[in-house]
Image: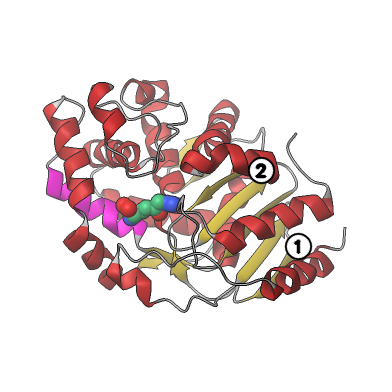
Amino acid sequence: MDYQKILNEIALEVGALENSGEVADYIPELAKVNADKFGIHLTTMNKEYFASGDSEEKFSIQSISKVFSLAMAFSLLGEKLWRRVGVEPSGNPFNSIVQLEYENGIPRNPFVNAGALVVVDVLLSELKDPEADLFAFVQSLTGSNEISYNKLVAQSEKETGYLNAAFVNMMKAKGNIVNETDEILDFYYKQCSIEMTCRELAAAFLHFGENGMSYEHAGFSLTKSQVKRLNALMLSCGFYDESGQFAFKVGLAGKSGVGGGIAAVYPEEFAVAVWSPKLNKKGNSVRGFHSLELLTTKTESSIF
Ligand code: DON
């Protein structure tokens, strides 16, 4: 498979289309990004690398970070985790609060904001130094010690994150949160404002494509069955109320973030990360989504 030729074609094809959508501006600091950036990086299981565009530039990974914190919490609690957070697609936007009230403070899945906040609560309860552990885990997955978060983005999220505070408070009122609201939010904003390049993200996600292999990173390990569950959740819930479309058009397990990144895996074959800041109405990168659709079409690779 000539992946390099295919990535070059994708970059040309998406570049020729109008750069539609909007940069996320509900986090003011994120709105400052150059909307014309585009990068894609694909790493195969045999550690071959292919890239195009701004694939070496760091960007805010936002909700893609929810996969890393979930992997840690799942490693710590095992199946007990699912008593506190569900595994069903929400059919709602990532920041919807309606379901949370009538479902008694148990979020639909770990990738809507409320679910990711429960996952943070678990990490704060179970770990002595959760922040150090999160960075050690991500650095170990990535094979790089140059992973950090953007303090301005974290601060900007904190200043405007009224809805996230509402999620935590409602879940605390309903008995599904142990730690203090501010501690949970501070950790969550650090996690969301982690910056990575497409190359680093693809390297990290490659481990989730090691189907059937246990792995351990910085003291956290997942069994074969747990890796399957993580991928199943990415497939069914990784793109919020657009998860069906992503499975339908792309056919890979993946996760998006409002920084415009998408990381995805084709188990036992490759991991790919793409970045383009403009988002569609569902909060997913327009060019990122389109690029991955082109990738699986041109390579005829899909998990189905
Ligand atoms: O809490 C928020 O709204 C952001 N830090 C993360 C949202 C996000 O990336 C949703 N993804 N598409």
Is any part of residue 92 visible from this angle?
yes
Would you place residue 28 above or below residue 290 in this image?
below
Q: Which residue does the numbered mark 1 point to in the structure image?
A: 48
Q: Earlier in the sequence, mark 2 or mark 1?
A: 1
Q: Give the side of residue 116 with respect to residue 205, left or right.
A: left
Q: Where does the image place residue 267, in percent across and percent down from the top left?
A: 69, 41
Q: Give the side of residue 97 with respect to residue 147, left or right.
A: left
Q: Amino acid under label 1?
A: Glu
From the image, state whether disc 2 or disc 1 is nearer to you.
2
Numbered range of the magenta stretch? 181-192
Would you place residue 64 above or below residue 209 in this image?
below
- Residue farthest to the right, as pictured: 1
Task: Say which residue appears at 35% left-offset and 28% top-offset.
Answer: 85
Q: Which residue does the numbered mark 2 point to in the structure image?
A: 252
Q: Nearer the viewer, residue 281 or 102?
A: 281
Badge 1 marks a residue whose secondary structure is loop
Q: Is residue 185 magenta?
A: yes
